[in-house]
Image (cartoon, rainbow, N blue to C red):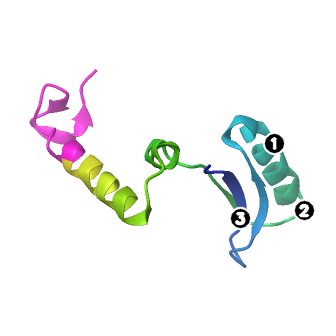
Amino acid sequence: MPKIRVVDLQSGQTLFECSIQESDKAYQFAAQMEDMGLDLKVIVPTLSDTLSSSLGLNRDEQKAYENSLEEEMEGHEGSCCFNDNDPNKILN
């Protein structure tokens, strides 16, 4: 199951790891470490990461799934959800 990780940017080392359900612990830990002067980032699994894990996809299947998601999203530019004059602006 994908986990939230708090990573030290200088060393790349994972300093803290927890389940997605305990995200508040990761952010609290990161805040405490940043107060001590560490430069950190919190890495939260994406929806596709969690779905791939729960479906039991292997690495190749996960990569194929992610590629299909990208193709699907790119195929929707110019649809009712996008402004044709500015394809980067999503309409509400």
Kindly check if marks 2 and 1 are in contact, taking CB atoms under 8 A apart as contact: no
- Please name the amino acid that badge 2 sits on: Met
How far apart are the two marked residues, 3 and 2, measured between alpha carbons?
Answer: 14 Å
Which tag, 3 or 1, sits closer to the chain's start? Answer: 3
- Please name the amino acid that badge 1 sits on: Lys
Horizontal side, residue 54 vs residue 16: left or right? left
80 in the magenta segment: yes
Residue linked to disc 2: 36
Query: Mark on residue 7?
Result: 3
91 in the magenta segment: yes
Horizontal side, residue 85 vs residue 57: left or right? left
Q: How many marks?
A: 3
Secondary structure under the numbered disc 1 in the rendered image: helix
Q: Nearer the viewer, residue 73 or 63?
A: 63
- Residue 7, compared with residue 32, is above or below; it is below
Residue linked to disc 1: 25
Q: Which residues are magenta?
A: 72-92
Q: Nearer the viewer, residue 78 or 67?
A: 67
